[in-house]
Image (cartoon, grey):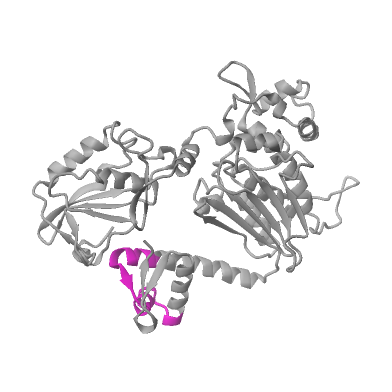
Amino acid sequence: MIDFSKIEQYRENNRIEAKKALGGLPRSVWETYSAFANTHGGIILLGVEEWADKSLHTVDLPDPDRLIKEFWDIANNPNKTSVNVLSSKDVFVQEVDGNHIVVINVPRAERSYKPVYVDGNPLCTYRRNGEGDYRCTKEEYQAMVRDASVKTQDMLVLNEMDLTVFNQESVRSYRQRMRLSRPGHVWEALEDEDFLLKLGAVGIGSDGKKHPTSAGLLMFGNEYDIVREFNAYFLDYQEQYDADTRWTDRIISSSGDWSGNVYDFYFRVYNKLIQDIKVPFKMDGGTRVDDTPVHQALREALANCLVNADYYGRQGLVIVKKRNSITMSNPGSFRIEIDAAKSGGVSDPRNGTMLKMFNLIDIGERAGSGIPNIFRVWREQNWTTPEITEQLEPERTILSLVFEKASGKKQAIKASNHTIYSRQKQSVIEYLTREIQADCKTIADLLEISSPRARAVLTKMVKEEIIITEGGNRNRTYKLKS
């Protein structure tokens, strides 16, 4: 919430929109409503005008209650808005310096409600950037639609394809692995076609006939058929051991000398990932055990990368192995908050049918314990804490795993510093939302730390593109990035 006693210090940005509204409810308010709901949320101020110097000033609305009633009537009209994401507490009259304005707090919409569009037209879907509201591209709209579906992306039945898209060797290999994992399973005696139907790799199309599902095509199809549906589909594994060479070994889905599907890619890559993992000598009933918690964590990480990728998204899935690290990058953002994924117990895979297929051969975790398990194993090995990051334009999720020893004290200090920085960052964001801008000394006083330490926090936030700087040296100030 902004400080209304200092409203002239605020500027329109990606979270604030001001409209004079003396002539009634502006038509453009609905574009802003859609934009805020589809982005990070924001505040619409009615009865506030922007002066030439960009500062905000209130005007006295003659009948703010009438504006609110008109707003609610339209917000609840499905012919105008696809969904009403507001509650009663989000819209109210605020008195500022004797003037009455209307405040509309638009929250960020849940993914199941997106895209939020207006005028009964899905093409009227907006998002917010520093320059205001902009109409979404077809690609942005389609990405929101895919993620909003109750059904996961890979449940789609591909009516235009037949069962010849399946690579028979991949299907045979999968069935053999499932026999070893689940001997005597009730599907074991089924013919391939019926087995794939039970598995979710085949579905009944609108014509009443059997067709591959998206999950089936991705897992067991041939690459040249996969790209017919997923035009940007590309799987890439690289080993980069030599700084002077782009890669020393590589596996790509488009090479033409193997199927190119997700199932075969998983095992080809997994066998590469574990080549340098040390296995302690351990016997179980006279048989050597070659599996360790690190192996299990790498299986989780690789499966997680594959089942959470948006295969319709731009750019491909890339895994890079170096001498002391592995980076897994897939198209698509996290469907839940990263902190929630780390804590476990929440599972919202983008491709749930593919996850089930991996589960049946004892790969992957449905209960949301996969990511916490990765962090736990790295902590037990005393390695550098894994990092999960999200990138935008295009949306990508990146998991970084480093095989470097760190002392327990050093790891604890790093974890503690990360927690402290997260709190400091949130305090700075909240302050700059209220006060618009601040210098280093002000932030140092806010955080109760020295100026050099405050400058380090601010520099990190600039690198993360959360804030921007204005001026130089002694006159430098910091603002939230628009």
User: Farthest residue in the top direction?
Assistant: 208
In percent of the image, x 50 and y 65: which residue is there? 419
* Side of 456 where 315 appears, left or right: right
The number of numbered discs placed on residues in the rendered structure image is 0
**In this rendering, is residue 5 above or below 301?**
below
Specify whether residue 67 is painted magenta.
no
The spot of residue 303 in percent (x, y) is 67, 45
Q: Main secondary structure of the magenta part?
A: helix
Q: 19 or 96, which is in the foreground?
A: 19
Compared to residue 408, the image places residue 304 above or below, namely above
Left or right side of 428 for 356: right
Could you say where residue 109 lies in the image, as x and y percent from the top left? 38, 44
Quarter residue 403 falls in: bottom right
Q: Quadrant of the C terminus?
A: bottom left
Q: Nearer the viewer, residue 76 or 391?
A: 391
**Residue at 33 percent of width and 66 percent of height:** 432
- Which segment did they paint magenta? 427-452
Task: List x then y, in percent, for residue 68.
Answer: 18, 43
